[in-house]
Amino acid sequence: MSGLMLLVVLAAGGQVDLPQARAVSPEKQVPRMQVLPLPRGEASVEREGREISRYHFGPELYRPFLYPLIGPSGKSLTRMGHPRDPNGHSHHNSVWISHHDVGGVGFWNDASSSKGRIVHRRVNRYEDADDEALIEVTNAWIETNGEGGGRTLLEETRTMRFQPGERWQWLLVLDVVLSAPQEPVTLGKTNFGLVGVRMAKTIGVHDGGGTIRNSEGAVNEPQVHEKPARWCDYSGPIAFEVPPGPPLNRPPSMAGITLLDHPLNPNHPTVFHVRDDGWMGAALTFDAPRTIEPGSPLKLRYGLWVHSGVPSAGQIDADFGEFAKIGDPPPPTKK
């Protein structure tokens, strides 16, 4: 069929049977999980054509982050900023990696006293597959001098794996490798860092109808805050069920995120920094500082289980057991 005839057929609403489409090899099928690169330093992660998250790494940012984290209801379970202090907590960008004291330099917040920035250097790879989508990047942790330059304290390889679960639930696996390029760097004793999660307002205990639980049976901030655990879960109402009933009688959809600390992490079980206002984080150096020596990188792995409902502690324990079996990211796909 000539090009002109093909255009005529398509304009008339007809269908053309392309020869190469009749027998597509399995490795060339449309993957269930895909990364879609976007302009302005963003990459969207899609599950069967529906966005579930987006990685932001533009040059204007203090640090990269993930937003949204879309749950089974179609709504994001995280938010940007504190619901009652958007300026003082402007660094609360959904899900992020950072630390309050890196060799005496603050990277955690956006205050003028914090001279650290986590700068995107390059995308190492995007991978698509049925069982996971993958984003791997290289970042530099830089002490800025106020003139656009500065000293690189740490080099970071960050790998984000997005794995589908049942009923539109999914797992985010965060692998972070921190290396000291020139001299030893000490992560100071603090409860701010390394992973932060800002939950949606309605899921918070204070501003919504949420509940915090951990693997030790503790509930809400007075019991959970600054306590060691294998996991910490934040669940609460997020949206109305679909299809909706009468406006005033629709039950809210319950959902949440479980933050998982991998057993291979050096401080496992980690202390969790958790607040009733909708914030939770894994505190890597709560008990003591940790020094990264040149040639001896620090390897860390965390999981975020994006789930529907309010799962039982037994169910989360089972999910944690599966997460604990997860190994290193796969090697790059051959080109």
Image (cartoon, grey):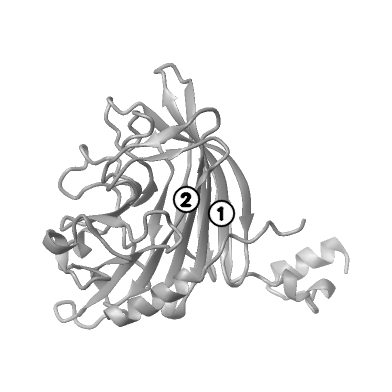
Task: Give the amino acid type for the residue marked by disc 2 in the picture.
Answer: Tyr
Q: Is residue 220 left or right of residue 186?
A: left
Classify mark 1: helix, strand or loop.
strand
Say if mark 1 contacts mark 2, CB within 8 Å. Answer: yes
Can residue 60 be seen in the rendering of this structure? no
Count neighbours of disc 1 (C-alpha within 10 A) and say few if under 14, some if 14 to 19, many if 20 or more: many
Q: Residue furthest right?
A: 2
Question: Which residue lies at the image location 20% right of the left edge and 80% below the top edge?
Answer: 251
Quarter of the N terminus within the rendering: bottom right
Give the quarter of the image for residue 276: bottom left
Q: Is residue 237 left or right of residue 11?
A: left
Q: Which residue is mark 2?
A: 55
Give the quarter of the image for residue 257: bottom left
Classify mark 2: helix, strand or loop.
strand
Q: Which residue is mark 1?
A: 135
Task: Give the amino acid type for the residue marked by disc 1 in the picture.
Answer: Ile
Residue 214 position within the rendered picture, expressed as x and y whole percent measured from the top left? 25, 68
Q: Is residue 327 above or below residue 121?
A: below
Count neighbours of disc 2 (C-alpha within 10 A) and say few if under 14, some if 14 to 19, many if 20 or more: many
Can residue 224 be seen in the rendering of this structure? yes
Quarter of the C terminus within the rendering: bottom right
Residue 153 position within the rendered picture, expressed as x and y whole percent measured from the top left? 47, 30
Residue 268 position within the rendered picture, expressed as x and y whole percent measured from the top left? 37, 59
Viewer-nearest residue: 4 or 288:
288
Q: CA distance from mark 1 to mark 2?
A: 9 Å
Question: Which residue lies at the image location 39% right of the left edge and 53% below the top edge?
Answer: 67
Give the quarter of the image for residue 304: bottom left
